[in-house]
Every structure is written in structure tokens, then in C-alpha cells.
Amino acid sequence: MSLKRVLIVNKSFPLAGLELLKNKVEAVVLPHLDYEPESLPTIKKNLKGIDGLIWNTKHKLTGELLDLAGPQLKSVTTMASGIDHIDVPELKKRGIPLGNTPQVLDDAVADITVGLLIAAARRFKEGVQELEAGEWKYGVQWMVGQDIAGSTVGIVGFGGIGQAVLRRLRGFDVARFIYSGRTDKPQAKTLGAERVPVEQLLKESDYVILACPLSKETKHMINADSLKTMKKTAVVVNIGRGELIDQEALYTALKEKQIFAAGLDVVTPEPIGKDHPLVSLPNCYIIPHMGSATVETRNKMASISAKNVLLGLEGKPMLFPC
Ligand code: NAP
């Protein structure tokens, strides 16, 4: 009997995942990275007749692509926690199970979040820029930033990553942790965090950390109006998705010093051009979506997506069903 076919749409899939698929399915890895122009056309050409799909790409998985695959497609997984790039209703309509890879990336993304928070609050970008320009001018008022000790930290989206961020920041003598979201989290009590409406969180936080999914509800939650309600000393850190922020409004707020700084792992678009206005700002510290980028974490994400897709093909529940 011939093996079922699993398509892996981006060539950067770690060996750790491929090993798990070996001899169980016929795994086809496409030869491109997302930003290569041939990437999406090659995906489209190779979808027909596949049984399983590892969607390890930022391209959107649409109904049109599912139609190209055909009705035998029985199992789909991302290699990510966020599923905003997947047309979930289209999969549901076709009865195709979907998995993702949360939890294993919480530590790596939380580390990056704390890194961004410190970098933005303590003006790493500006400091390095001045040093590299030969303009290191010591003075007691030069490059002064914001403290973490004694601050209020607000976490929007108190899931796996949000809670891991709190656990790390506990060592920084934060005065108060608050979070916002659709439901109360039972872990909040032990972690010492209080749930408040998002409007209150934005008003009272020294650090606003965006760690929620992108949805109709959360798109542009940081906008011209909400930025006006924030403290002048506030720092915004976004590890969720770029579209949580209206970037034009953020640019204005940072330029006019309505807020102190931003640290962004995610932006719109990705990759962002080097001439983008946000990139030019000394108080906007951007890194290129590196949240889960550690060797160990990427291996774990690949292993889980391999296990998800195999379980789906066997008609069993995936490790992380969406
Ligand atoms: P998670 O464990 O599912 O947590 C997400 C949390 O967001 C949930 O607790 C959810 O709780 C909350 N949420 C949902 N809708 C919300 C809303 N409207 N307002 C506030 N909170 C809301 O997911 P995770 O693994 O922590 O990941 C969170 C997001 O981070 C992902 O969706 C993804 O976009 C992003 N991410 C980025 C990276 C990176 O490399 N930068 C890596 C992984 C994930 P309630 O529904 O109960 O409110």
C-alpha cells in the first residue's frame, strides 16, 4: 500500500520533524522560503492530491488553496501558535482537523519579550546608534530611560506566552501586574495578576505587552485614540502580530513623544522595508520576528507539527487541536 503524502510548504522545516515522518508518510518538502517569489506559485502547483499539510509559512491558507488540494486532504497543522493566517471556517466546513504548536515556544518568546522591553525602555537602539556615530556623550541626563522596578506591567492576552512573561518579570520587582482578555485565567491568582478592562490596562500600565492573537476584535487595538489614553512614559511591546497596532498612529505617537518607546518583534508587513518610517525612529526598537527562533524551540515546533499531522491522518485527536 502506498504511503500517504504530506506536503511541507517551506524548505526550512527542521530535521527533527522530518525524522518523525520518515517511513510513515511520503513527506515532500518544497524548495523555497516565504519571501522568494516562487514560494506561493510552487505551493499551488504541489497541493493536488496531498493527504496531509504542514503549513510552516506565513502565506494565508485559503479556501481556494484547499480546493486545489482536493477532498482527500485529511490533516492540517501550522508550525506556529497563531492561526490568523489560516481560514479556519473553511477547514471546519470541510471537516479537516487543524493543529498548531503552542506551549513549546512560550519560554523562547517570553525571553524575547523581556529583551524587547528592556531594550526599548533603556534606549538600546538610540545608544548604539550614537556610539556607532562616534557621538557617545556621557552626561547624567544622557540616554536616561524608564525603570521596571516599581512599575505596572499590563499584559494583553494572558495565555501561554503572557504568563511566561509575567513569571520572568517577577524577578524585576514590578509593583503590579494586570492583564486583559476575554476570560478570567485561574493561574492569575497564583501569579499575582488582576484582570482589568483593556481600556484601564492601557491607561494604568507603564509597560503594555501585546501577547494576544490577531482577530477582528484585536486588530488595531493600539490606535490613535488608545495611544492618547496611555502614559507619556509608557513602553509598548508587541510580540503578538503586527496588525494589533495601527502603525501610522504608533509612528505619530512615538515621533511626538506621546509615549516613550516601542519594542516590536512583529510588524506589518513582514519583512518591513528598511525605509519604513517606523524603522527610522530611535525610540522604536524592531527585531525581525525572532520570538520562537531558538534551535531547541524550532525543533520542538517541528516535532509537534509532524505529530499533529500524523495523528490527524490516523483520525486521532492532534496534540494541539485548534
Ligand atoms: P495562547 O496560549 O492561546 O494565549 C492567547 C491568549 O490571548 C489567551 O489566553 C486568550 O484568552 C487571549 N485572548 C484572546 N482574545 C483576546 C482578546 N480579544 N483580548 C485579549 N486577550 C485575548 O497563545 P500564545 O501561544 O500565548 O500566543 C499568543 C499570540 O502570540 C499568538 O496568537 C500569536 O499571534 C503570537 N505569537 C507570536 C510569536 C512570535 O514569534 N512573536 C510566537 C508565538 C505566538 P481569552 O480568550 O480567555 O481572553
Image (cartoon, rainbow, N blue to C red):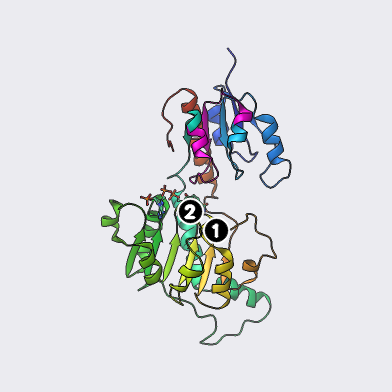
* Furthest-right residue in this view: 38
* Residue with the mark numbered 1: 265
Placement of 189 over or under 281, stated as above or below: above
Tell me what residue is drawn at x 26 percent, y 56 percent: 189
- Based on the displayed image, in which of its 4 quarters is residue 318 positioned? top left
How far from the left and from the top, in percent, is residue 35?
A: 68, 47
- Please name the amino acid that badge 2 sits on: Val
Classify the position of the N terminus by image quarter: top right
Classify the position of the C terminus by image quarter: top left
- Please name the amino acid that badge 1 sits on: Asp
The yes-or-no answer for disc 1 within 8 Å of ligand 1 is: yes
In the image, residue 284 lies in the stretch drawn in magenta: no
Tell me the distance, in whole angstroms, between the alpha carbons under discs 1 and 2.
9 Å
* Residue with the mark numbered 2: 109
Frontmost residue, 52 versus 136: 52
Frontmost residue, 201 versus 90: 90
The stretch of residues the image draws in magenta is: 67-92
At mark 2, the secondary structure is helix
1 vs 2, front mark: 1
The yes-or-no answer for disc 2 within 8 Å of ligand 1 is: yes
Tell me what residue is drawn at x 50 percent, y 80 percent: 144
